[in-house]
Image (spheres, rainbow, N blue to C red):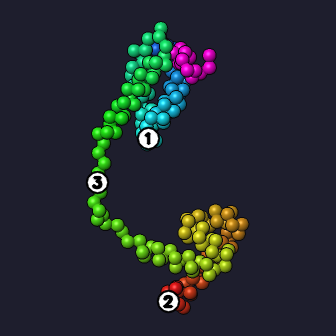
Amino acid sequence: MPVGTPDGAEWGLLMAAAQDGQGGPYRRLLDELRRWLTGFFARRLPPSQVEDAVQETLIAIHDKRHTYDRTRPFKPWLVAVARYKWIDRLRSMTRTRADVLDEEIAVADHESAVTSAAILDQLLGQLKPAQQAVIRLVKIEGFSIEEASAYTGQSSSLVKVNIHRGLARMAAMIEQHGAVD
């Protein structure tokens, strides 16, 4: 019978083997149950709650594995455990209170950062494309000289020269104009 069939017959055999102390079948069972429980909770809980519910249910299955009666179908036992964990999760969600935020929360002013970014973009736009590309990669995005070289196809020496010349040109533009409009 294929794994994960609706009646869970194979899961029952794996659980019985686990009750007999066989680790391999138990690990396989827990792995298959993890996948099934993820789908079960994904249809019933918010995405941020799914993984926690799966973990709690797997722990409960581990703690209560001795209560499984191997003469009875496994899937109803599994669904009962999962259902109780789902109800517990719903109860805890209703107890969680959302804090009301004050209308006058202080927010940092981003004007200088936005202005600086616009000026930098304007200065970079006046450089040669090769200089502009390596300055963005190395000085803004944090790439190494070697990474920028591989990305742009320029030699490492040329990357260094283009950065030096581009930064010097930008400094000269700032000195000449005082501020970029």
- The residue at the point 56 percent across, 87 percent down is 172
- Residue 10, position as x, y percentages in the image: 56, 17
Of all residues shown, which one is farthest toward the top? 71
Residue 10 inside the magenta-drawn segment: yes
Magenta span covers which residues?
A: 1-13
Is 22 placed above or below 165 here? above
- Residue 99, position as x, y percentages in the image: 29, 51
The residue where tag 3 is placed is 100
- The residue at the point 43 percent across, 14 percent down is 68
Q: Secondary structure at mark 3?
A: loop
The residue where tag 2 is placed is 178
- As drawn, the label of residue 46 is 1
Q: Nearer the viewer, mark 2 or mark 3?
A: 3
Is 56 placed above or below 164 here? above
On the question of residue 160 being in view, the answer is no
Q: Amino acid at mark 1?
A: Pro
Q: Quadrant of residue 52?
A: top left
Label 3 crowd (10 A; few <14 / some 14-19 / many >=20): few
- Residue 144, position as x, y percentages in the image: 59, 64
- Frontmost residue, 155 versus 130: 130
- The residue at the point 39 percent across, 19 percent down is 64
Q: Amino acid at mark 3?
A: Val
Of all residues shown, which one is farthest toward the bottom? 176
Is 110 placed above or below 56 here? below
